[in-house]
Each structure stands twice: as C-alpha cells, then as structure tokens.
C-alpha cells in the first residue's frame, strides 16, 4: 500500500479498550490485529493506574516494534516519550499539539480529534498534526456521547494534505463507504476486538482487504502493476 505522511499507510487503525482488551488479553489481542495487517495501533486506557499504563504501554511498544507498526499513545505524550512510542493522539481537551511536538520531536506522529468540524482540522494542521480524526460516523459503545459526523467531512478534509481517519462505530459492514468517501485510516475498537485472537486476526485481515479493493492509492498501485 502507498505510504502517507511519516510512513503511515492506508488501513486499519486498531485502538485498545480497557473492557474489550483487558490486561490479561491486551497483548494477545494486539498481536492478533497485527497479524491481520493493522497498520497503526493506539493504546487507550482511561481507567488504569499510571503504573499499569506504563507497564502495558511498554509491552505494546515491544510488540509493535517487532511488527514494524507504529504505536500511538492516547492523550499522554509523556507516556509516549517514556516508552519510546511513535507518537500520541490528542483530543480537543487533552493538551497542546505544539507542546506534544516539543516533547516528542519532529519525527513523532501526532494525531488530533476533529469531531465533524473542518475548522478544528485547519487548526490542528496549523499546530502540527500529522493525521486528522473525524467521527463518530455510527453509534459507538466506546464514545456514545460523541457528536455524529457526515461522511462528506472526510471528502472535504482531503485538501488539507494530512491522512484522514474515520472513527466511531465502524464495522466491516459499514466501512467501505468511509474509505470511498476519503478515509485513509479506519480507527476501530468494538468492530475489531472482543472475540478470540483468531477472530480478531480474521477481522483485521478483512478490513485490510477493503482498503486493497477501495482505497485510491491501493487501486492506483494495482493498476500500475498490470502489464
């Protein structure tokens, strides 16, 4: 698949969850997603203690490094720095992108939550975001209070020159229209995790196949490869 900014690739963005990927299953679930082809992983746990978060993030960093896939830490640039993660994702109330950049350096991958607002996306780009996350696009058990977003925001965000991420209630059944609307990455929680490692791997593989079949950069590569 064609590379985006900072080596990111179009595809599945696997996001952990304290309920769906509890401590005793966290590593095995992420390993399964990586075997299935996930191109980016985010460690997200709002409930664990600081010590637990450090331990879990350290374990996931080792797993992701071995797989050659970047690990992003949700809402905590300092934790990202401590474990050597590839970067951090910040919500609208989770601190400054500029401060995160100073802490993590120019090579770090910084993501920003933009909900359904292009004005927030413009601000995030100006502050140094490397990818932009929009959503929710469907009902989400992880963030039921998140505002709904139309698919058109993905299309309009393409001109900003950053990889576009869709999030919120995404499953294999509703993913294709989001890719066709302009999503470079699909951030998936419940639609990926919760089953056995074998089920997670198969689901991740199916998400990646959707990108192979419907993402513009993948289609252009396929066309270019034909004799």
Image: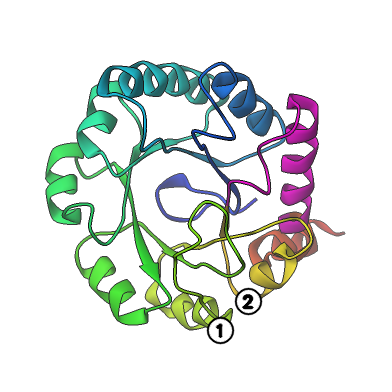
Q: Residues within 10 Å of mark 2 (few under 14, many from 20)?
A: some
Q: Which one is nearer the viewer's eye here, 92 or 78?
A: 92
Tell me how far mark 2 sits from mark 1, CA to CA: 7 Å
Q: Is residue 23 left or right of residue 113?
A: right
Identify residue for label 2: 181
Assign the C terminus to one quadrant of the image. Answer: bottom right
66 above or below 11?
Answer: above
Q: Is residue 187 left or right of residue 209?
A: left
224 above or below 94?
Answer: below
Q: Secondary structure at mark 2?
A: helix
**In this figure, which colouring scheme has been used for the structure?**
rainbow
Q: Residues within 10 Å of mark 1 (few under 14, many from 20)?
A: few
Say if the magenta span includes residue 201.
Answer: yes
Going from N to C along the chain, the mark reached first, 2 or 1, is 1
Percent coordinates x, y for residue 118 in the rendering? 36, 80
The residue lying at 52 percent from left, 33 percent from top is 69
Identify residue for label 1: 152
The residue lying at 41 percent from left, 65 percent from top is 162
Mark 2 near mark 1, Cβ–Cβ under 8 Å? yes
Q: Secondary structure at mark 1?
A: helix
Main SS category, magenta section: helix
State the extent of the magenta-drawn residues as a range. Answer: 188-211
Q: Is residue 139 left or right of residue 17?
A: right
Say if the magenta span includes residue 204.
Answer: yes
């Amino acid at each position: 698949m064609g590379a985006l900014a900072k080596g990111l690739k179009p595809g599945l963005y696997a996001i952990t969850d304290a309920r769906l990927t509890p401590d005793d299953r966290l590593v095995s679930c992420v390993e399964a997603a990586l075997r299935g082809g996930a191109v980016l992983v985010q460690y997200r746990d709002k409930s664990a203690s600081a010590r637990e978060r450090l331990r879990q993030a350290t374990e996931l960093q080792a797993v992701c490094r071995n797989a050659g896939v970047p690990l992003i830490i949700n809402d905590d640039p300092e934790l990202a720095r401590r474990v050597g993660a590839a970067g951090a994702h910040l919500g609208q109330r989770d601190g400054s992108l500029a401060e995160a950049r100073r802490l993590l350096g120019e090579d770090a991958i910084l993501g920003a939550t933009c909900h359904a607002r292009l004005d927030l996306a413009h601000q995030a780009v100006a502050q140094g975001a490397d990818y932009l996350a929009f959503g929710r696009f469907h009902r989400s058990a992880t963030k039921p209070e998140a505002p709904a977003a139309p698919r058109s925001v993905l299309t309009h965000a393409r001109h900003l020159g950053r990889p576009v991420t869709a999030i919120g209630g995404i499953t294999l059944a509703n993913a294709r229209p989001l890719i066709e609307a302009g999503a470079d990455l699909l951030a998936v929680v419940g639609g990926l995790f919760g089953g056995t490692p074998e089920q997670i791997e198969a689901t991740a593989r199916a998400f990646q196949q959707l990108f192979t079949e419907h993402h513009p950069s993948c289609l252009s590569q396929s066309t270019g490869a034909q004799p």
